[in-house]
Amino acid sequence: MSLQDCNLIDLPRINDRRGNLTFVEAGRHIPFAIRRVYYLYDVPGGSERGGHAHKALHQLIIAMSGSFDIHLDDGHSRKTVHMNRSYYGLSVCPMIWRAIDNFSSGAVCMVLASDYYDELDYYRDYNEFVGAAQKAAK
């Protein structure tokens, strides 16, 4: 996988004077079944979350409230995506190192994941990840 496989998905928006609504449907808006949902909140200023890659897990990351930056790295190139709209989701595929920082006050980061939590799916050491990514690219 590469950074080209990570992209913003414009989620449906239903505008209503009483308040707007956005929804996500597995298989329609994202290419995986949703097996787990988790969210980050009350992140202290200056803190970083993430700092890992997944071997097989697909994710959709949404800024439910506030804003934050997602730094993506495929072992060859890097890019940063600023998230600040609840109707955009960033699709992050396997074998992409991610770090999340620059959380605004009150930010909520929601993640939809393709599978249940499995510690064996993680690369937590950056050098190990780069070695595996380079091996997979050959």
Image (cartoon, rainbow, N blue to C red):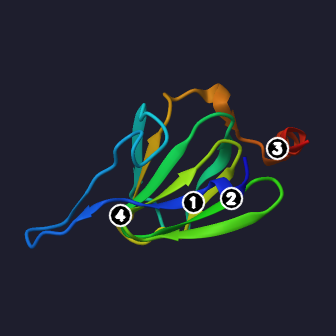
Q: Secondary structure at mark 2?
A: helix
Which is nearer the N-term, disc 3 or disc 4? Answer: 4
Q: Residues within 10 Å of mark 1 (few under 14, many from 20)?
A: some
The reply to whether discs 1 and 4 touch (Cβ–Cβ < 8 Å) is no
Count of numbered badges drawn on the protein: 4
Q: Residues within 10 Å of mark 3 (few under 14, many from 20)?
A: many
Q: Residues under labels 1 and 2: Cα distance?
A: 7 Å
Q: Which mark is residue 59?
A: none
Residue at image coords 12%, 69%: 16
Q: Amino acid at mark 3?
A: Ala
Name the residue tied to disc 4.
87
Q: Amino acid at mark 1?
A: Asn
Which is nearer the N-term, disc 2 or disc 3? Answer: 2
**Mark 2, mark 3: which one is toward the viewer?**
2
Name the residue tied to disc 2.
4
Q: Nearer the viewer, residue 103 or 37?
A: 37
Q: Secondary structure at mark 4?
A: loop
